[in-house]
Structure formats: C-alpha cells, structure tokens
Image (spheres, grey):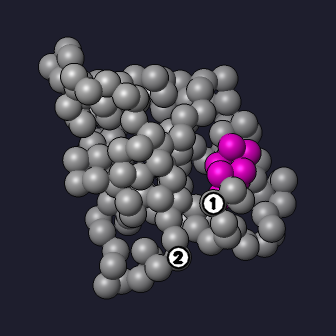
Amino acid sequence: MISKAKIRALAQEGHPMLLVGGDRRALLGLARNLHRNSRFAEGPFLIHRGGSRGLPKNRKLSLVGLCAQLFRKAEGGTVYFENVDLLSMEEAKQLYMVLERGEFWDPETEELVPVTFRVLGSAPEAVLEPHQASSLIYRLAERIIRLEDQD
C-alpha cells in the first residue's frame, strides 16, 4: 500500500501517471487521492473507461468531438483513463495528442485547444510487457506508480 505522504508527494508532481497493479477499485481510489492532493483538486475528477463507454452520449458527434467534449469538461481538473489498453484507435490518438503536444483538436471550434487538466491512467501489468507496449502507454507512463509501491 502507498503511504499518504507518498501520495501527497506524487500528487504534487503534476505530470501524467500510469497506475498499475491491484484491482479496479484500488486503482480508482489511488487516482482520486492523487487528484485530491494535487493543484488540480479544485477542478473536476472525470473518469473515462476505455472503449468509449465513458464518453458523453451524443450520437450527433464524432468520436473526436466526444473526446473534445470530455477534455473541455475536464478544464482545471483531472481525467482518469481507466484501462488505457482498451481505448479505441481514435481515443488513443486524441489522448496521445494531449500527452505529446499539450493540446487537443476541437472540431466544434476547429482549433487546437491548450490542455488545462491532468491525465492519469491505469492498465493491467501485462500491458507493460515490451511486446505489447504502445507509444501511448509509454508516453502516459512518464511516471509509473505500482499500487504495491512502498516508501
């Protein structure tokens, strides 16, 4: 289990993090604690479950538009991508742009919008094996936090 002091220290780092190990609820709890102890705590904590299930239900928008809607809602807060390994190709492309360039494409305004939120993600341990790794996972894994980490 990760100590409260370590969670506070990690929360202050502010960059993208990949959380691995443990069960879904434990990873979500850790993500919430990282958000609550960060400079993004005043903003929303949004959960996106891989495979577009967590996107707003608006059949008139493309997947790019739905991702942009999620990112706009996240302004000043944290987006937690549960199971980044289950993201659709388009979701992964949008997230990669956020991580790599610090901006996202908004088809509504037809502009690139600067990112004003933090990204956390989770993935099963198996995703970190070299033969399965993608550039998205490695970009998100700027800091890998294993649930069983100790001080």
- The residue sitting at the right extreme is 4
Q: Nearer the viewer, mark 2 or mark 1?
A: 1
Q: Which mark is residue 125?
A: 2
- Tell me: residue 2, above or below residue 98: below
Amino acid type shown at disc 1: Arg
Residue positioned 67% across, 70% down in the render: 22
**Structural distance between the alpha carbons of marks 2 and 1:** 12 Å
Tell me if residue 90 is in the magenta stretch.
no
Within the image, what quadrant is residue 6 found in?
bottom right
| Crowding near the residue tagged with mark 2, few <14, some 14–19, many ≥20 C-alpha atoms within 10 Å | few
Q: Secondary structure at mark 1?
A: helix
Q: From the top left corner, tell me how far across and down residue 115 is, in percent.
A: 39, 31
**Outermost residue, left side:** 110
Relative side of 145 to 143, left or right: right
Taking the image as shown, residue 68 lies to the left or right of residue 83, namely left
Chain-order first, disc 2 or disc 1? 1
Which residue is at the front of the view, 90 or 58? 58
Amino acid type at mark 2: Glu
Q: Quadrant of the N terminus?
A: bottom right
Query: What residue lies at 73% left-to-right and 45% top-to-bottom?
Result: 33
Q: Which residues are magenta?
A: 27-33
Residue 31 falls inside the magenta stretch: yes
Q: Quadrant of the C terminus?
A: bottom right
Labelled pair 2, 1 in contact (Cβ < 8 Å): no
Residue 42 visible somewhere in the drawing: yes
Which class describes the residues within 10 Å of circle 1: few (<14), some (14-19), or many (20+)? Answer: some
Q: What residue would you read off at disc 1?
A: 24
Q: Residue at x 58, y 61 (%)?
A: 19
Q: In the image, residue 59 lies at what x, y percent? A: 26, 27
User: Could you say where residue 75 lies in the image, as x and y percent from the top left?
Assistant: 48, 23
Query: Can residue 111 be seen at all in this image of the molecule?
Result: no
